[in-house]
Image (cartoon, rainbow, N blue to C red):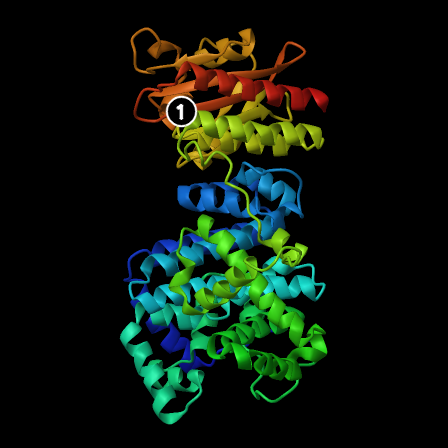
Amino acid sequence: MTDAVPAADQEDVATAQQLLADLSKVRDFPALSQVISKVNHIASSENSRTDELTESILKDVSLTNKLLRVVNSVHYKQLGSGPVNTVSRAIVILGYDTVRDAALSLMLFDHLANHAQAAELKGEAVESFYCGILGRAMAHRAGMRDGEEVLICSLFRNLGRMMCRLHFFDKSKEVEQLVADQGLAEDVASRRIFGISYDEFGLALGRHWHLPNSLLQGMAPLPPGSTKVVGNDVPKLQVMANMARDLYIATRDSEPESAKEAYANLLKRYGQVVHLQTDDLEELVYQASAVMEKESASLQVDIRSSPMLARLLSRDEDEANQPAGETEPADAVEDSAILQAPGEEASAHDPTAILITGMQDLTNLLLENAKPADVLHVAAELLYRARCFDNVLICTIDANGKELVGRIGLGPNAERNKASFRIPLAFAPDVFHVAISKNADLLIADTQADSIRERIPAWYKERIGARSFLLLPITLNNRTVAVLYADKHDGALQLAQQTLGLIKALRNQITLALRQK
């Protein structure tokens, strides 16, 4: 079995670079590329930290809320336990790769859906995500464990085509015309118009975004020759992603009465690997449409913009009206269920709602006997997501036992803050020593006020310089072992009494977690 990613020739590389240069002028594409590249870099780095991946996701409030809705679907809950209210805990439970795959899928889909102006493109954007769900469902039915990788590879399998359709629409219509008039294969026609095939451009985009080799392999087309049987010498991830795409196309282009014949033809090519029957494929097609309908709420799209999905769902509605006793298979219902996103019903921006629901994750981590570091990551995320602060930092005792240093940070100045914070435990005539020596909670409303200016240490003024901040020490056996720090860089902190009480309760849960260890 080969794990090599198909190489591009020099002419394709030059053409892809020109198309990427054209795309770089498109609204939101550079930002999308930057975030996707960063998420992939973090997830693949041996030295990456939970707070780095968390911060990359938290920068987009909409993505954060959608991701939490997705990871609370029944499908993901089977991988974890209980509701997940924070990205940090999702990473703890599901792992870096699963959270990365879910985030990348949502980022790409949002880009496609938000930029699709023409009605037909809106439908195609929806169908691209359906193709991913179909791939995941097929992977599970075939007994594969890496269903999330199949989902993202199935979604990205049409990446080149979708980005060309979205941003070079007129030229993509020329490709359609060539296919219709001359009977050319779409990749042949796209190469004639764009100078590169849709598939090769999709892989070029994947390389540009630094997707890992496993995903590039999975989204690559199969070797040419549509009549060849796919054998065991092809990576299964690649087989499943290509079959999901072909099954989607067969469903889209076939009349209901001829669909089974199209599925039987697919099995001539893929059956040696997937070991599914024609009836299995038909069932999966309809189950995936039910899942897509349920997930449309979190994706915030009208899935009936896709004529194909509208047709599939109309059959489901007909079956829903069937006589009592004839019900949908249990696994279809379970796999399609999705929970309301934690805290969204109140408000995605309400600090009280975010803290209340998020603290359930801290409680669950305590019950799961989680590592202290995992508890601290969740706590930092909750403080940051409450949107009361610009920067959040958790300091813990250094190995020498003589000072508190920055460990976990979120916010635009996170890296600088972590490098700058070194609070000595020995006496110093400043507010930090008051907090750690007297176990005193401090809210400094204005660091430039005459009454407090002299108590702000020089290192803080020079390297941090926030206008206001909150300090909450964490003590064990009358000794400060950590400090929660959160600031407003240019303004005054304004915390409602209930919000401040919840933040202190969060600090108490951290103390309990550390005491257990």
Q: Quadrant of residue 85?
A: top right
Amino acid at pointer 1:
Asp
- Residue 195 in view here: yes
- In the image, farthest residue toward the bottom: 182
Mark 1 neighbour density, 10 Å: few (under 14) some (14–19) many (20 or more): many
Of 63 and 297, nearer the camera is 297
Q: Position of residue 36 (x, y in %)?
A: 45, 55
Q: Which residue is at a point 43% across and 31% down the rendered structure image?
A: 346
Q: Position of residue 177 (x, y in %)?
A: 32, 85
- Residue 41 in view here: no
Q: Which residue is mark 1?
A: 487
> Is residue 229 depicted above or below 461 in this figure?
below
In the rendered structure, the answer to whether residue 230 lies left or right of residue 418 reads right
In the rendered structure, the answer to whether residue 324 lies left or right of residue 351 reads right
Where's the C terminus, which quadrant? top right
Where's the N terminus, which quadrant? bottom right
Q: Which residue is at a point 59% across and 42% down the rendered structure image?
A: 90
In the rendered structure, the answer to whether residue 187 lies left or right of residue 275 reads left
> Is residue 145 depicted above or below 242 in this figure?
above
Q: Position of residue 509 (x, y in %)?
A: 61, 21
Count of numbered circles in the view: 1
Q: Position of residue 50 (x, y in %)?
A: 57, 41
Of 371 and 163, nearer the camera is 163
> Is residue 23 depicted above or below 512 in this figure?
below
